[in-house]
Image: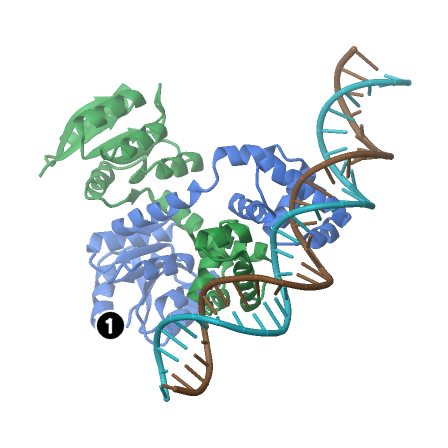
Chain colours: A green, B blue, C brown, D cyan
Amino acid sequence: MTIRVLVAEDQAAVRAALVMILRAEPEFEVVGQAADGEEAVRLALELRPDVVLMDVQMPRLDGVSATRQVVAAGASQVLVLTTFDLDEYVYGALRAGAAGFLLKDLEADTLVEGIRTVARGDGMLAPSVTRRLIGAFARPERRVGPEARDAVGALTAREREVLACLGAGLSNGEIAARLEMAEATTKTHVSRILAKLRLRSRVQAAILAQDLGLSI
Amino acid sequence: MTIRVLVAEDQAAVRAALVMILRAEPEFEVVGQAADGEEAVRLALELRPDVVLMDVQMPRLDGVSATRQVVAAGASQVLVLTTFDLDEYVYGALRAGAAGFLLKDLEADTLVEGIRTVARGDGMLAPSVTRRLIGAFARPERRVGPEARDAVGALTAREREVLACLGAGLSNGEIAARLEMAEATTKTHVSRILAKLRLRSRVQAAILAQDLGLSI
DNA sequence: AGCCCGCTACATCGAAAGATGCAGACCGGG
DNA sequence: CCCGGTCTGCATCTTTCGATGTAGCGGGCT
């Protein structure tokens, strides 16, 4: 079971080096090479490789945008490669749907292992990127204490529905329409929610709903 | 430069195996072993190892809580180890401040490499965990499009102050007091903010302020 | 059965929010 | 210098919100 790889990298010397590393491994087959983003997208859609090795800095279409298109088409797993681990590149690539992000100062072993990893559907990140991603992930959730979660647990199912609507920024009238109840009933629910959660306005309820990740 | 490691794992056989792996590497020094979470915290604070290898399932105090305490004290980097890669464990551990998260089905090499990685301040995740973390990270950002950021850029400084207060869930009266203006003036600002951002209520403005990370 | 609880509904009333018009302050350009 | 534009501020008026009381209805429990 060979892993079919497309190499997208504009610098010919670097591209040649990458291809050489891959050719040294019998399990890889380099099915194509691209020198810019547009070519990368075109070849990915045509060849459907298992993995696209994608440089960030490329002419005509940058690697992040190319990644977005390849992933949107469901063509391949994309492993992004770059010299600089700027936040902008990292976050951009990951949001574009990249399965991994490696820096070019890597060992051949790491690259091989990375391609293997993303080929089987897992993720692979450079260690420094991993740490920052963990940090970025860990921060947002500090807001909601357990007491708030408990209080929300004390709400009835219907009240939670209303709370989710509040989190979406709907007015009482809109909530009533969506949940098929009278506006007066919505007000009743809102009042109860505020009382149970010890909040003073629907705005605070909406923020809490956001933090809890409630969605309608 | 040896790396000082504390092993926290309740199953004696597993603990012994981990210690054996570490002892085989001359760069590691196992400075302590703990059989439960409380002991792990106590030893970490006392011995200040470079890395704590922390099991999730432990008696008396679970590994996630223990991690939180060790990290809060700034004692060590924590590499969490578990048999099951349940979301609950992963997210809990990472939010608790863990530098890494590995599954117990790992190779000895991976463990060694993981400890080395977290010891120098980087992050290390099992590949399957990496993929899910990327997914979890990529999703949240759908909320705020560039157009919203542009619109916020069109606000005046004063209006942005008011918007930040909205994001905190304050009423017009509270905003007026905090920013030292009349409540009527606050209302003017709120109205202008809503018009510029094309929103229909302060609730939506508050949600947007949250997503933008505005804070007072 | 009787009972409690949750959902729904409506009315009423005071408080908060939001739209609108207008005035003084400030600033760069003519 | 004055002029238009923008920012800031305040007051007035209508709408929406939120609290409170009352009540019918259905489902689960004893």
Position of residue B198 in the picture relative to residue B104 (left or right)? right
Residue B27 % position (x, y): 29, 55
For label 1, the residue is B11
Task: Identify the residue at image location x=34%, y=45%.
Answer: B134
Residue under mark 1: which chain is it in? B
Residue B98 % position (x, y): 39, 57
Position of residue B62 in the picture relative to residue B179 (left or right)? left
Quarter of the rendering containing residue B7: bottom left
Residue A19 % position (x, y): 19, 27
Three-letter amino acid code of the residue under disc 1:
Gln
Is residue D7 placed above or below A210 in the rendered structure?
Answer: above
Task: Identify the residue at image location x=31%, y=49%.
Answer: B132
Label 1 neighbour load within 10 Å: few <14, some 14-19, many 20+:
few
Determine the secondary structure under disc 1. loop
Is residue B209 visible to the viewer in this orientation of the structure? yes
Query: Relative to the observer, which residue lies in front, A157 or B76?
Result: A157
